[in-house]
Amino acid sequence: MARDFPSFKSGAQLSKQSITIWRIVQTAVWLAGAAILFCLVFFPSLGIVLFWNILIPVAPVLLVVFAGVWRNVCPLATNALLPRHINISKRKRLSTTQIAKFNLVAVAFLYLIVPLRHAFFNTNGLASAVLIMSMVLVSLVCGFFFEWKSAWCSGLCPVHPVEKLYGSKTMLAVPNAHCSECRNCVIPCPDSTPGMHPLTAAKTIYNKISGYLMAGGFPGFVWGWFHVPDHKGLNSIGQLSEIYALPFFGALVTLILFSGFKKIFTKKDEVTIISIFAATAVACYYWYRIPSLFGFGMYDNDGTLFNLKNTIPQWAIYLSMISSAIFFFWWIVFRPSNKNSWIVRPDYATEKVNNKGAIK
Ligand code: SF4
């Protein structure tokens, strides 16, 4: 029987009406993304505000609460899956090890690119546009050659490691608005596995490295990132090392702490430890991002959306910082899990798909 939003249980298939609604939303979000890209090139000041000071600050909370909704409407996912939707994808299968390698590349990319925001992307619209266009191109190539979400959305996308870190207690599992049938292209499928986290089924060394780097290293990386001011370009090797030094140092410290906790506590406590580190990372992000958005940041107008310094009292900012930290710890660590996956797995393909992902 066809099941539909909002009664989403396993094997949910979307009705024609729901598919139409999701396609409209996907198109609207894709057009919004294209408009931001256009602004980054032709109206860089506006583009930077829209992308770095509105879209990106909203993204972490979206990943924490509605990871599946984001996976359904992300404009890069729409690009990546376009070849599959219009039936021109070669639909090649990737092995579990290949996907694990892709995941490690995604984590490396995240760690290398994010500090460059201080050097280029935060202040240079064209540089940001080039970065986004490169990802558009890679996502399209991934979708053209590989089955469903295996190569981009669950492989090379640099946001995916953050989804896995933040999205372990999503609010609800929405129907899958991309995969029309499940072909077991990723095992385990991050969309369809309840309580997904960076070390879920870490079978290969590549999974383990990327899992540790995200669960352990990311909180310190975020902390370090906020202690570096924006530069307009890079003038020396010293500046290059400055933008990487604190984020990498922070990542190293929390990674050592994480590894220590993992050794002290039992395997049973692993999920709790990961959730504490995940909550620390996202709480740390808003702890620094909220003040900077409203003109109370550490470095002049870096990342400011509205300068309210002379309009609202400092305690209002402290209150929002503390409230957001309490919210994320409650949501990710203390709130009982509802055992939702991000997205409901669609029915399996008619051909039998074995547990190694091969179509029989
Ligand atoms: S739902 Fe199935 S086809 Fe879609 S990404 Fe997950 S494993 Fe692949």
Image (cartoon, rainbow, N blue to C red):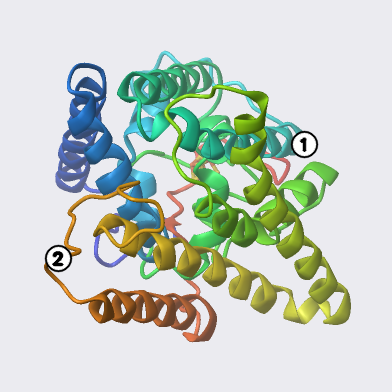
Which labelled disc corresponds to residue 203?
A: none
Disc 1, SS = helix
Left or right of 15? Residue 11 is right
Residue 316 image position (x, y, % from top left):
23, 78
Residue 93 picture quarter: top right
Q: Residue at x 30, y 62 (%)?
A: 296
Q: Earlier in the sequence, mark 1 or mark 2?
A: 1
Q: Which mark is residue 97?
A: 1
Above or below, 58 against 184 in this view is: below
Q: Is residue 264 left or right of residue 270?
A: right
The type of residue carrying mark 2 is Asn
- Residue 176 visible in the picture: no
The quarter of the picture where residue 106 lies is: top right
- Which percent across, then down, holds residue 171? 37, 70
Residue topped by disc 2: 310
Residue farthest right in this picture = 263
| Placement of 104 over or under 260, stated as above or below | above
